[in-house]
Image (spheres, coloured by chain):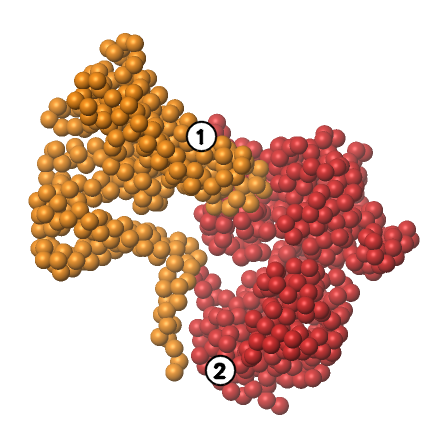
Amino acid sequence: MIPRLELRNISKRYPGVVANDDISMTILPGEIHAVLGENGAGKSTLMKIIYGAAQADSGEIVCDGKLIEAHNPATSRALGIEMVYQHFALFESVTVVENIALAVSGAFDLNALAAQITELSARYGMPIDPWQRVHDLSVGERQRVEIVRCLLQSPKLLILDEPTSVLTPQAVTKLFETLRQLASEGCSILYISHKLDEVQELCDSATVLRNGKVTGAARPKETTAIELARMMVGSKLPEMHVTPSVRSEKPVLSVRGLSAPAGKSGIALSDISFDVHGGEIVGLAGVSGNGQAELISLLSGERLHRDGGSIGIDGKPVDRLDAAARRKLGLTFVPEERLGRGAVPPHSLWQNAVLTGHKAGLVRRGLVDRGKANGFARAVIEKFKVKANGVQAAAQSLSGGNLQKYIVGREIALQPKLLLVSQPTWGVDVGAAAFIRQTLVDLSRAGAAVLVVSEELDELFEICDRLLVICQGRVSPSLIRTQTNREEVGLLMTRIGGNNETGRSGQVALQN
Amino acid sequence: MRFRIEQRTEPSASMRVAAPVVATVLTLLVGSAMFAVLGYDPLSTLQAFFIAPLNSMNGLSELLLKASPLILIGCGLAVGFRANVWNIGAEGQLIIGAIAACGVGLFYPDPESPLLLPLMVLAGACAGMLWAAIPAFLRARMNTNEILVTLMLTYIATLFLSWLVHGPWRDPAGFNYPQTALLPAAAMFEPFDYSYRLNPSIFITGVAVLVMWLFTDRSFLGYKMSVGGAAPLAARYAGFRESAAVWTGLLAGGAAAGIAGMAELSGPLGQLSPQISPGYGFAAIIVAFIGRLNAFGIVLGGLLMSLLFLGGETVQLTLGLSSSLTRVFQGILLFFLLAADFFIFYRIRLIPEHA
């Protein structure tokens, strides 16, 4: 059989790093092929090269037996190679069909295209309404739009970059069905992920990358997760030690009846109440875009709420206090956006240490103490094994995962009483993710209160003592981790309260 | 072959040094070509532009005299520019500063008091800050655009000055010229040497440069402002207040411009007239950017800008070039300087096309 795609000795270097080093792999027609690897292993670069968005320094790409020359995204699409990016490129203010019309060639006939979209999306079991505006769609639906956009081109090879990071467990199951159907029709699928269980469930074969090199090829269904992880990480995975939690008597963070109007294209929060005690980790589960961002910015003090309700830290009401004042009470916070929020992109790492570390002795008499800031940054880099070109490296020169390690390290080094963390291990490699989780557990066992917002249920189940679920701006009562399961949480993620029918059944599920 | 613009992973250190050199060489080449085409000898024109003004003590004195307000205002503006606070009304703040200083100089009860000069500096700074406080208040409270407000206030200041010197403050013994009476001697900076115009107000600029360096490079407040400029969300995340940056940025610019206006008044001018500044407030914006918003860069930028002013006058006087031609030449230099900066952060790559 002629392979759908063959890579021969692909190499690509960027200044200072070899992103891809002599990579060869083969994908057959109808095969679902996983590319596994830690962050910074070179997965994204390789996909960009295959799609033509980046050019390899050396090596060849052969598609259906023909060498691809003068490679760019346009030639790729002409050959039937399509890519669904992790972050969608949709125009929010116009309808689905208009978005898709922009991407497909041919006559501009919206009605015909809409009919095509309806038909195609129904055939692959992921119905979408072509006349809906994109800003009304959930993240999962937006991903469908992207996939349908690709399917309209009847692709021969579909590349998906971490497609499940924004989906509920139920939506993941649905997506996998679609992908299997596609593969059975002969379309090859290249599936980039770091989630081993998904790869094992879905993929026929896998290529594992580490530090830009191929470190192994495997049949995921016949290989254990531990073996795959070892190929990715190159060493034994650290084991998590989760000791029983000793809760403080009084809550460190208490939220009572918090409501807030929807901001720009945001979600309104209604009547949220919960506590986080010292010594415990509380997880907030939910599909992204259900009010997590709004809630966390109200808690951190970046936004002040004016509606009802109250937030207390250590028994003091903090409703009127801004982010700096709340930090003085012992709060630290790791935001979801690393560049531009958690760190200043063009500033060096030592300067970024001052961003929140200024109260930890990095500023004296109004002047920044560079020596101390350097020392602080160096300690974080060492402890969290941040790969960076020293403390002078600009934040924007770090990979996402490394910057995340740096920010988590900085906020933990400030010895918080209350730590808020959004997506602690997004884009962080397996080894580092385990280390970050362990650090969070250790921090809480040392007496700090930790609130983790994450879309990864596995992560929450691994480290949290209690779980909250957020959906449509409402938060469920807390669930004890040991007394609940993924299915219950998954159900709550799609329906809590609300006025529709599913909402009522959500209430029932809660009472159970 | 195709070209592609790529962002560098880190700003290039060698380009940082090479950029001004490349810009200068390109300016000389393009300028020479322009002069040659128009029938002027390129070498003697360039000589008149860049060398002749520096050939005498008087030339050097004039260079520093003109550079001083540019550097002073540039430093003040850069404080705000670093935080994305765009005060482009320094010209107006300069005028108001000069007016306030002149008011103190003319109407202070004891015209011989040694306190007069310091009081005038204070009045100039306060008036400049007051004028800048209007856009600061509007921006911090009502989120108005400070670019528009500062610019419009410049016109108000200009007209206010014009009204004063044509009306209430006109010197009764001034043959009806629109100007105030001359300031008393105690209200003037005494030149270092009466043959030249350079005076001790340049020390104020020197101090301002040091304060600016300390502020932007070492102080926590300066750090907070640079965070606000580079990443507003990060500033909010850390709890740095935007309004503090707006106030600091505008007041720093206003104070610097106000003092510069006072120094012009108590230095070369000696009295108010409708035109008291050859556009120092606007040229200082360019100076701040040529200097990359860095204190010592602004010193170099101010000296260059001043040389361009002087060179432009020299070629008009000695070679008869038109003033618009000298401005075109000045524009070429600034264009290349700012364009060369691009290559510090970006590079252009040639991509061979497979046929």
Residue B280: image x %, image y %? 28, 37
- SS for dot 1: helix
Q: Residue furthest bottom?
A: A1
Residue at (31% x, 27% y) in the render: B163
Tag 2, which chain?
A: A
Observer-nearest of B338 and B146: B146
Residue B87 % position (x, y):
40, 38
- Chain B pictured colour: orange
Q: In the image, what residue type sits under mark 1?
A: Ala
Image mark 1: chain: B
The N terminus of chain B appears in which quarter of the rendering? bottom left
Quadrant of the image containing the C terminus of chain B: bottom left
How far from the left and from the top, in percent, is residue A21?
Answer: 50, 71
Q: Is residue B150 left or right of residue A404?
A: left
* Rendered view: A124 above or below A263: below
Position of A154 with respect to B206 (left or right) is right
Q: Which chain is red?
A: A
Q: Which residue is mark 1?
A: B133
Is residue B289 among the parts visible in the rendering? yes
Q: Which residue is mark 2?
A: A68
Amino acid at pointer 2 = Ile
Where in the figure is residue A11, as x and y percent of width and height? Answer: 48, 72
Residue B277 vertical placement versus A450 (above, below): above
As drawn, A57 above or below A443: below
> Is B277 rendered above or below residue A37?
above
Which residue does the image show at 20% across and 44% down from the upper left? B308
Q: Does B14 sit left or right of A111 as displayed?
A: left
